Each structure stands twice: as structure tokens, then as C-alpha cells.
Image: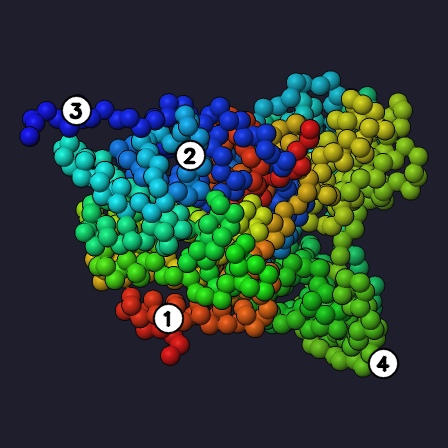
């Protein structure tokens, strides 16, 4: 696949992400689309480490490392400061993990979106607090092992649907994206950049370390998440207009689950139950997008 | 107290600010697996008897580099125009795309490239190696003889091709019907070989005495005389008027001596000559039946030809064999013995026995016998000795001191009698002679073994010459090792052909040309198994920015200072052109 995007890299080699890190791939693609006139706010997350210890930085753009809960608030402030300086050209973005988005930073994010602050919030989602040692978050999917949902105590609660929560705010633009679909990802970032107001992009970023996944399968598993409808690719404009970007051929979830150590305890019955939940979510999405679901 | 000074000047930042990149961290030290570029062998190229680099030919075609694609064929096969028409394309049977949707139409693309080269009068730019002192005589200008002379010329040897008849081509000219191979295609290919330095002497039949004479002027003699003598049925009535040899009938038509046929024609046999004779007879107005002693699926004729024969209204009578031919009121009365399948051999081919005394008499006006051919002279027979004789896959070499080397090639020694095997035979002979002259007979087998495509038996001239293909891993790419996420379902192009009615009216070529855009579309379907086609996935997905584009032929290299060995590039390579190996300390 050759991308019709600038060859310029805004990331340096030598970062300290784990081998096969999906979040590092996500950052590479996003920065290619954003370009150098970007200020990035990183609340506590894997990327607080990946970006390098002081005095190093792996990113070629200005970055502010911030406290866990402040992703939305700091971005609002930086945007206001840029406006005061008369700089409307620079894009202000927040780059947060799922913990800093779904849980700890949710209040600040919700506030910023409610105020329709002019910034883009990226959540790279690796489905747990990976950096601190794989603790469950409200983004951890049903069925997953984490260090705080060990053994038979695996998570029996559903993953929070963050995009729908933000759509409920009537956010200007919200989209899901995957590292396995770089063309779609870059298109969505470019589109978000061209809009004004609060924008949110949810990027599925696989984590070989936390998911018990061979590092070389990182992109493959992200692609399977889309193909099985576990992580559908879609976008919502003005909180109303849904567009589903890819309609997969209906692969079953089994293979996706079987490849990952974090799901190895699941029985066939559990997987059947998960398949039902995935189908239910997909049909709900189809209804929102104005398509008639095949079942029901 | 409002101030008019800009905010920035009043409150300097007191937060620490990074001033170094992370490039000082050589994260390559984390690595215990090493990804590498490594091209492998595609199953189609190993299945091609002449070892054409098919995956690369498709890649170049898809890129629109038609001339380069055509030249890539010519390194391994001097007859893309002929083989693009008459080859039975075993490559397509092994195409990995078969597991996905349909095999790539490799045969059609080969013909397209030959047509394009002919249309734009492309000249091929292959360089000959330095001239050698040895001279070779080639007897017979069929596909094996011409291929031998061509490859010998490529390796720097002078040769003289002796042809008994007035025009070169052998079976290509006299045996294959016009609707499969128009003569101007053959003429073009032959004149390209002549331009390349192949000397052809027509009307020069060669006798056994020549072998003795040749000693003075030649260091080796290649016998590519073919199997031109038809086998008899050995039944009563074979000599009656109206009974004719099928191969002879085909020759006559190609010479322009076209008879008219009326009534019913029976063709005895199940090989390509039988089917060719039957289809030719149908074009001359006869009602034709093919009588074969085994079943249709056991026929030696190519399945595609048999299918087209059936489409053209030819009847195939299975499990019947003639036992007597009689003449009755100007017609032929043929007695057929019914046969039965006694058992099947390992390849599933029927072994047959007569079905009691069950017989049937049929009345026909003409009968063509096409039950097989053999060598016309007994001195063409392979040597029975083993001393000083080397048997290769498609040729046999007899080398004795102070005697010119005698090479039996083409149909005389090939594993399968087909045009492409004849080409393979000529190539093998040229390579074997080169090794023999340079390194002696002992080196021959091991040296040829190193030039196998995959596990063989096909040989590659490019590998022999040490071209880029020589670096390829011999392991054959399996379907499972491809990343098919990057390919979309797309049916193969439908090969354009004359309609059934149009076919029967003349000897016009059946398969029609395809255009450039269709050819590109079809070639794009190719997985290019084992080859890098610069798709750039490895660079695109690398989390370490450790794949760097450059201007070497690979187009990129891996910066092992930073590569952590995650292996992602190897999995995301759609065509298995990379490998992940344990890091050697």
C-alpha cells in the first residue's frame, strides 16, 4: 500500500515504545496528516514515556506533558493562548490513552467538548492502563484479562462506547480509526484538521505487551478488529450524520480472540455471547447510520 | 492594570524544555529477531518447464513495463509468441491465486507481451557472453534445436542449425494447425533468433555419415530431430485408400495442399495430433469423430484443446479401438472393439482390456491414424550404454574423448513431448555443454542443480548467468504464507475467442488479442509471490521509522540501529518477500 501522503516524518527513531507498539504507529500516521504546525498535549499515558525522558523528545513538534486528568482543560487553555497571540494556524491537539480519556480525563474532555473548544482530541485506545502495568479501564473489552481482572475474575462488563458518549454532546466531528487502515486514518485526521470546534478521533491501537499478542501481529489484529465488527470504522458529523466507512464481510469474532493471550480463558459459550454483543452493537450502529440491519 | 505589551514577553516560560531527540537511543540492541528482505520462488515459475520468472513478468506488466517483461521471458524462453499460443500452461495450475479466486491468466499475458513486442518492433537488449572457441552443430530446427542454438549464442558459442525441409520451425511449422499458431508469428520469432546470430541452413538433411564428418568442424552435435515418424495401427486394412496418417494430413494443410473432405471422418488416437487432425477435418467440412481406446480424461491431448474440439461439434468415442478396416462400396467399414477399464494407475490413468467380444461396425469415408510418433531413424535412438553418458531431465549427453559431444534433445529425450519441454531441453543442453567445455563432465550435474527454479526440474538461465534471480531463496511460496488482506477478489479476464461458428469456417486463429489495459488489469491480480513490488508496507507500518527508502534496487533498507525486531513488516508484507530470522550474536 502506498500512501499519497507526505514522506516527512515528525517522529524520530529511538523512542522507547515496546516492539510492535500500535500507539507509535498511530502517532506516525496522525503527525503525517497534521504537519508541523501542531502543538500537542499529552496527559499521563504510554506516550508520556515513549516520547522520551527529559531532555529528549522523539517528536519534532512542541509537546506539553500534563497531568492525567487535564487533557481537555490544557488544550482549551493552549487554544485560548494561541488565539490571544493571533495564531489561528496552529492546530492544538490532545493525545491521550484510553485511561486518560474514558476514565480519569473524561470530565475535562466532556467540559471542553460541551464548550465546543477548537481542538482535536485523539484517544489512542489500547484497552487498559498499559504503561502502569495492564490495569483495567472502562475501555477494556468484555472478556479481557488484566492485572486487576485476573484469572476467573476477567472483566464481565462491556467496553464504554466513548464515541457515542461524545456524539451525545453533539460534537462537531467524531470518528473511529484503526492503525490497520492508514488511508482512512489519515483522511479522517485531515478532515478533522479542516474543521473548527471540538473534534474527537478514536484510534484502535493494539498493544502486544498488554494483550499477550506476538509483536508482529500488531497491525493484523487491528485489521481483524475492524473485519469482525468489534471496532467498526465510522464517523459522525455534528452529532447527527453517521457514515460507516467500511462494511466488512462478516467475519466471526473467534479468530480475533484466539490470537490474544488476554482472552485465552474464554470458553466457546463466552465467545458465542461476545459474538451476540458484537452483532447487537453493529446493528445498533447500522440503525443510527440509517441502514436497515439484516437481523431483527 | 492593563498592559499593551504582548503576553509572551512578560512571562517567560519556566518549565523545562527538551533539546535532544531520541536518536541517541540505539533501540536495535533490544532486537532478538532480525527482519530481512529475501525474495523467494513463486510456484508458477517452478511449474513452468522453461522456468520463466512469471511473478516478475506479471509485476513488470502491471507496471506497464512491457518491454522489460518481454525481455524477462526471453532470458528463459526464445518463443513468447509461440508459447503464448501453444503452451499448455502448467503454470496456471499452480497459481496461488487459485486458492483465492481464479488463477492469473499467465498464458494470455505472455501472448500479449509477444504481440506488443511485435507491434512496436521491439528489439531485445540481451548481451551475449564473450565468444568461445567451440562450435556446435544443431540438427533439426524445431523448438528444441532453435532453443539450443539461441541459448548457445547467448553463452557465446557459434552454431549451425541444419534443417531438412525448406523452412525452419519443425513441428511448429508442419505439425501445429494454423488456428493455433499462424505462420507469421513463427517467422517473426525465427528471424529474431537469426538476428541474434543463429545460423539456419535449410534444405540440408543430415545423415548418419554427417556425425563422422562433423568431427572436423564441430565440438558438439545437438540432435533435435523430433518424432516425425507415425506409429502404425498394425491392423488389417490399414493400407486402404482413404486411410491416412494424421500427422501427414496436418503437414499437407500447412503446405497449402488443402483437401476437401466430405462425409464422416474418424480419427484414431487421443493425443494432440489426433485432436488437431480432427479439428482441422471439421474445418474442411467433415463430420468428425475421435475414437480413443481409453477415456476422455486419459487423453494425452491438452484438456483445453479437447474441450474446444467438443465445442466445435466433434464427437469423442471412448473405450473403443479399431481391429479391422475394410472397403465397402467406396466407404470404409471399421470394426471397433469395445474396451473396459481394468484398473487405474497412480496418476488415475486407465489400464484397459477388451470387453469380451463386443464389437461394432461403423461406416466412414475417411480415417486418420494418430496414435503416436516416434523417431524417424534408428540412429536417433538414445544410447544404451551408461559410460560417458549423462542423462539429464530433458536431454542426454554422450561425451567420449576425441569425439564431438552428442546431445539428444527435444522429443528424443524430453520428459514430456511438448513445445515448452523442447525449449527446456534446448536450454538444458546449452547450459550442460557450457559446463562440460569449461569444467568437464563431472561438474555438469551439480552445476545444473544450482540453477534449478525452486526444487526443479525447471532450469533458469538467469540463475546460471548469475543475474539477480540467483539470489532468490529456492523455497516455494505457499498460499498460507501470503498476507491476502491486501488483495481484493477479482475474476480473471475472459480470454477473447472466435465464436464456435466463426471457428469452423476457416483456419483463422481462435484466440484473439487483448489490449494493454486489460493486460495490466490482469497482471495486477498476480500476487507476485515472493517478490518485492515496492508496495512500501514495510516502511509504512514500521513503528520505529527504521525502514529507510534509498536508491538501491531494493528501494529501501532496514536501519538495524533502531529496528527492535517486532516483525511487523514481515507479516504485513503481502507477498512473503521478507523473512524473520533469529538474531546471530
In-front residue for pair B51/A114 = A114
Q: Which residue is mark 4?
A: B356
Does the CB distance between marks 4 and 3 fall below 8 Å?
no
Q: Chain of mark 3?
A: B
Measure the C-alpha gap from mark 2 to mark 4.
Answer: 88 Å
Above or below: residue A134 compared with residue B64: below
Label 4 element class: strand
Q: Quadrant of residue B568?
A: top right
**Discs 4 and 3 share one subunit:** yes
Measure the C-alpha gap from mark 1 to mark 2.
Answer: 39 Å
Q: Residue at x 58, y 70 (%)?
A: A268
Q: Residue at x 66, y 45 (%)?
A: B476
Kindly report which numbered mark, 3 or 2, lies closer to the viewer in this rendering: 3
Q: Which residue is mark 3?
A: B10
Quarter of the image for the N terminus of chain B: give it.
top left
The local crowd at label 2, few if under 14, some if 14 to 19, many if 20 or more residues have their Cα within 10 Å, is: many
Q: Chain of mark 1?
A: A
In-front residue for pair B446/B331 = B446
Q: Which residue is mark 1?
A: A283
Measure the C-alpha gap from mark 3 to mark 2.
Answer: 30 Å
**Which label number is shown at residue A51?**
2
Amino acid at each position: 500500500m502506498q500512501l499519497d501522503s507526505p514522506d516527512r516524518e515528525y517522529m524520530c527513531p529511538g523512542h522507547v515504545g515496546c516492539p510492535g507498539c500500535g500507539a507509535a504507529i498511530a502517532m506516525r500516521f496522525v503527525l503525517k496528516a497534521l504537519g508541523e504546525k501542531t502543538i500537542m498535549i499529552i496527559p499521563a499515558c504510554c506516550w508520556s514515556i515513549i516520547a522520551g525522558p527529559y531532555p529528549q523528545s522523539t517528536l519534532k513538534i512542541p509537546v506539553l506533558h500534563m497531568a492525567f486528568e487535564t487533557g481537555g482543560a490544557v488544550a482549551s487553555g493552549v487554544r485560548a493562548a494561541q488565539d490571544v497571540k493571533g495564531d489561528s494556524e496552529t492546530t492544538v491537539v490532545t493525545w491521550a490513552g484510553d485511561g486518560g480519556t474514558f476514565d480519569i480525563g473524561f470530565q475535562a474532555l466532556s467540559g471542553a467538548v460541551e464548550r465546543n473548544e477548537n481542538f482535536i482530541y485523539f484517544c489512542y485506545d489500547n484497552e487498559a492502563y498499559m504503561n502502569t502495568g495492564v490495569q483495567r479501564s472502562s475501555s477494556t473489552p468484555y472478556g479481557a484479562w488484566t492485572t486487576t481482572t485476573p484469572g476467573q475474575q476477567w472483566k464481565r462488563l462491556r467496553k464504554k462506547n466513548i464515541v457515542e458518549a461524545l456524539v451525545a454532546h453533539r460534537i462537531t466531528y467524531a470518528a473511529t480509526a484503526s492503525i490497520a487502515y492508514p488511508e482512512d486514518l489519515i483522511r479522517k485526521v485531515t478532515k478533522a484538521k479542516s474543521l473548527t470546534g471540538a473534534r474527537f478521533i478514536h484510534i484502535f491501537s493494539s498493544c502486544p505487551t498488554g494483550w499477550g499478542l506476538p509483536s508482529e501481529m500488531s497491525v493484523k489484529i487491528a485489521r481483524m478488529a475492524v473485519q469482525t465488527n468489534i471496532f467498526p470504522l465510522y464517523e459522525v458529523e455534528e452529532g447527527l450524520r453517521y457514515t460507516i466507512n467500511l462494511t466488512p464481510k462478516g467475519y466471526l469474532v473467534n479468530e480475533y480472540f484466539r490470537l490474544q493471550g488476554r482472552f485465552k480463558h474464554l470458553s466457546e459459550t463466552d465467545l458465542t455471547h461476545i459474538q451476540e454483543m458484537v452483532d447487537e452493537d453493529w446493528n445498533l450502529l447500522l440503525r443510527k447510520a440509517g441502514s436497515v440491519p439484516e437481523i431483527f | 492594570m492593563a498592559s499593551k505589551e504582548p503576553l509572551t514577553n512578560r512571562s517567560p516560560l519556566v518549565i523545562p524544555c527538551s533539546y535532544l531527540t531520541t536518536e541517541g537511543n540505539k533501540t536495535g540492541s533490544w532486537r532478538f529477531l532480525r527482519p530481512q528482505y529475501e525474495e523467494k520462488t513463486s510456484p508458477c515459475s517452478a511449474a513452468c518447464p522453461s522456468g520463466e520468472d512469471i511473478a516478475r513478468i506479471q509485476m513488470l506488466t502491471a507496471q506497464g513495463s512491457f518491454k522489460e517483461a518481454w525481455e524477462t521471458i526471453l532470458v528463459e524462453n526464445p518463443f513468447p509468441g509461440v508459447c503464448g499460443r501453444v503452451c499448455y500452461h502448467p503454470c496456471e495450475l499452480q497459481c496461488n491465486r487459485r486458492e483465492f479466486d481464479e488463477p492469473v491468466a499467465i498464458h494470455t499475458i505472455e501472448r500479449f507481451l509477444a504481440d506488443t513486442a511485435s507491434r512496436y518492433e521491439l528489439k531485445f537488449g540481451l548481451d551475449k557472453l564473450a565468444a568461445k572457441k567451440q562450435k556446435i552443430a544443431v540438427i533439426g530446427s524445431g523448438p528444441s534445436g532453435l532453443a539450443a542454438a539461441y541459448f548457445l549464442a547467448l553463452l557465446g558459442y557459434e552454431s549451425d542449425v541444419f534443417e531438412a525441409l525448406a523452412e525452419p520451425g519443425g513441428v511448429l511449422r508442419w505439425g501445429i494447425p494454423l488456428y493455433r499458431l499462424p505462420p507469421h508469428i513463427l517467422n517473426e520469432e525465427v528471424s529474431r533468433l537469426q538476428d541474434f546470430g543463429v545460423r539456419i541452413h535449410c534444405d540440408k538433411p543430415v545423415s548418419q555419415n554427417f556425425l563422422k564428418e562433423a568431427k572436423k568442424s564441430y565440438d558438439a552435435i545437438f540432435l533435435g530431430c523430433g518424432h516425425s515418424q507415425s506409429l502404425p495401427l498394425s491392423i488389417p486394412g490399414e493400407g486402404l485408400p482413404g486411410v491416412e496418417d494424421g500427422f501427414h494430413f496436418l503437414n499437407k494443410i500447412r503446405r497449402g495442399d488443402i483437401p476437401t473432405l466430405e462425409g464422416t471422418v474418424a480419427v484414431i488416437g487421443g493425443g494432440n495430433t489426433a485432436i488437431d487432425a480432427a479439428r482441422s477435418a471439421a474445418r474442411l467440412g467433415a463430420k468428425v469423430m475421435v475414437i480413443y481406446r481409453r477415456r476422455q480424461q486419459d487423453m494425452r491431448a491438452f484438456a483445453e484443446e479437447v474441450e474446444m474440439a467438443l465445442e466445435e461439434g466433434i464427437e469423442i468415442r471412448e473405450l473403443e479401438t479399431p481391429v479391422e478396416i475394410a472397403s465397402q462400396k467406396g466407404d470404409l467399414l471399421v470394426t471397433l472393439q469395445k474396451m473396459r477399464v481394468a484398473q487405474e494407475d497412480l496418476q488415475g490413468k486407465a489400464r484397459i482390456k477388451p470387453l469380451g467380444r463386443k464389437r461394432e461396425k461403423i461406416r466412414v469415408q475417411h480415417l486418420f491414424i494418430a496414435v503416436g510418433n516416434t523417431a524417424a531413424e534408428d540412429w536417433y535412438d538414445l544410447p544404451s550404454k551408461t559410460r560417458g553418458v549423462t542423462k539429464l531431465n530433458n536431454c542426454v549427453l554422450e561425451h567420449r574423448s576425441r569425439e564431438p559431444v552428442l546431445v539428444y534433445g527435444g522429443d528424443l529425450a524430453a520428459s514430456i513431448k511438448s513445445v515448452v519441454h523442447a525449449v527446456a531441453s534446448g536450454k538444458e543442453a546449452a547450459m550442460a555443454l557450457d559446463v562440460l567445455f569449461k569444467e568437464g563432465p563431472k561438474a555438469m550435474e551439480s552445476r545444473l542443480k544450482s540453477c534449478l527454479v525452486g526444487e526443479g526440474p525447471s532450469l533458469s538461465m538467469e540463475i546460471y548467468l548469475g543475474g539477480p534471480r540467483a539470489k532468490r531463496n529456492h523455497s516455494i511460496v505457499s498460499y498460507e504464507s501470503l498476507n491476502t488482506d491486501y488483495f481484493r477478489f477479482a475474476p480473471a479476464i475472459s480470454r477473447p475467442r472466435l465464436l464456435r461458428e466463426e471457428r469452423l469456417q476457416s483456419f483463422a486463429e481462435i484466440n484473439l488479442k487483448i489490449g494493454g489495459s486489460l493486460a495490466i488489469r490482469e497482471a495486477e491480480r498476480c500476487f507476485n509471490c515472493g517478490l518485492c513490488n515496492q508496495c512500501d508496507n514495510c516502511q509504512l507500518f514500521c513503528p520505529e521509522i527504521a525502514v529507510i527508502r534509498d536508491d538501491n534496487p531494493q528501494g529501501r533498507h532496514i536501519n538495524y540501529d533502531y529496528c527492535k525486531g517486532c516483525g511487523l513488516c514481515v507479516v504485513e508484507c503481502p507477498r512473503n518477500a521478507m523473512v524473520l530470522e533469529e538474531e546471530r550474536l
